[in-house]
Every structure is written in C-alpha cells, then in structure tokens.
Image: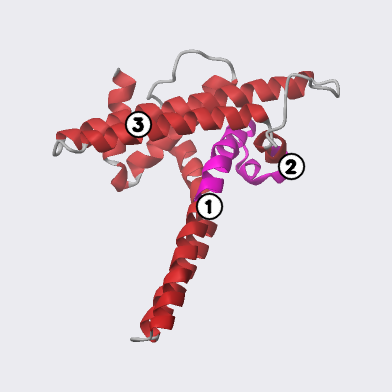
Amino acid sequence: VKTVLIGGVLSLLGFLIVPAILVVGYLLRVLRARMHGEEEPPVFDEWGDMLREGAYGFAIAIVYGIVPAIIGTALIAVGVGGAVAGGDSGASAFVGGLVVLVGVLVLFALSLVVAYVLPAALANYVDTERFGSAFSVSDLRPVLLSGKYAAAWAVGLVVVVVAAFVGTLLNVVPILGTVVAAFVTFYAIVAAYYCVGTAWGELRDIEMHDDGDSPDEQPAV
C-alpha cells in the first residue's frame, strides 16, 4: 500500500519531470526483481540511485520515441500546410486531409512498435547495466520474436488498457477521479512490467541452459 501511494503521488507530479524519472527508476527495479525471480515488489528507497537509473531509462524512452514523433509530426504538418496553402481548393483540402490521416496512422503504428520494443530494451539495460544494450539489435531480436515475450507484453497491455478505461470512468468525478486514476494507472503499469520482467527472466534461463534446442520456446511469428 505504501509503495502504491508513493508511486501514485509521483505519477500525479510527473509533469515536474523528476517525479516521472523516479517512477521510471522504480519500474526498472521491478524488471530487475522479477528477472531474478523475486516475488515481493521492490520499495521506494535509495532515492539517489533510483533517480540516476531512472534518468538512463528516461533517456532510453526518449530516444525510442523521437523517430515516431518526428515522422508523424512531419506528415501531419505537411498535410495541414498543403491544405492551408490550397486555400479554398477542394482538391488541396482533400489531399491535405489524406496526408494528415496517413500521418496519424503512421504515428500510431510506430508508437505501437515502440511500446512493444521499449520494455525489452529497458530490461536489457537493467540486465547488462550498459546503456548501449538498450539498442542492441542482436540482443533484442530473439526476445522480441519470442512467443513468451509477446504473450507477456500482451497481458501487460490488456492490464494497462483496462486501467485506462477505469481511469476514464473515474474522471467523471472532478479532481478526486483524476487523483484515484493516477494510483490505478501506476499499479497497472507496475503489473505490466512485472509480466515483462518475468518473461525476460525465463527467456534468460532458457538461453543459459540452452544446448542448441529449446523445445519449450516458440517464436512469436
């Protein structure tokens, strides 16, 4: 309860950046705890270390988010600019609107890809304690293509989506609903990273004990 209360408050203050970094640091602790088989959730302590590690995690997330943001924003800007430049031309407005729609769809698709890759990237950073490991294609590819990771990520996504739906319902109540929704969302994200950390630990055990044939592990595609 204490951990959820602290995490919820930090989530509410996330717009101040530092609290958001602390939340990221805690999520990295969740990954580390689960990949090493720990059942009890970590606590908020050693704030300096959490802030430092969270800053690395925050930076990793920013790097992964830059490309979708640039591409999607560029397409949307081109579409809006073309529609405005066309003035009252119906054809220009249609083409501009079509480009904007494509930009939105591309942004959504790339954001979904980032959402799938990012937890694995953070897990690899935590596992190796090297910043560059978060971008190691050779390390991440087998994990991202494994059925175990895909299933864990899907379960986590469902938990987060359900929490978001509950949060939307809670927002009907002014202020109080927003506050409670922050705690629900924090709990859901922790649960999602719990799933990812568990899958990462199991995949790592498979790799460590693999003799060239892993019959229990099936590819995602």
Between residue 195 and residue 33, name the one nearer to us.
Answer: 195
Q: Residue at 46% across / 76% down in the picture?
A: 95
The secondary structure making up most of the magenta span is: helix
Q: Which mark is residue 46?
A: none
Q: Is residue 72 left or right of residue 35?
A: left
Residue lying farthest to the left in this orientation: 174
Q: Which residue is mark 3?
A: 163
- For marks 1 and 2 on the same chain, the one whose residue lies earlier in the sequence: 1
Q: Secondary structure at mark 3?
A: helix
Start and end of the magenta stretch? 110-139
Between residue 128 and residue 172, name the one nearer to us.
Answer: 172
Above or below for 155 versus 97: above
- For marks 3 and 1 on the same chain, the one whose residue lies earlier in the sequence: 1
Q: Which mark is residue 138?
A: 2
Look at the image and tell me in which quarter the C terminus lies. Answer: top right
Residue 87 % position (x, y): 35, 86
Above or below for 64 versus 25: below
**Which of the two marks, 1 or 2, is nearer to us in this view?**
1
Q: Is residue 147 left or right of residue 88?
A: right
**Which of the two marks, 3 or 2, is nearer to us in this view?**
3
- For marks 3 and 2 on the same chain, the one whose residue lies earlier in the sequence: 2
Q: How is the image coloured?
A: secondary structure
Tally the marks: 3
- Say which amino acid is labelled 1: Ala
Visible residue check, residue 38: yes
- Say which amino acid is labelled 2: Ser
Residue lying farthest to the top in this orientation: 39
Whether residue 177 appears in magenta in the rendering, the answer is no
Visible residue check, residue 189: no
Residue 2 % position (x, y): 29, 19
Residue 109 % position (x, y): 53, 52
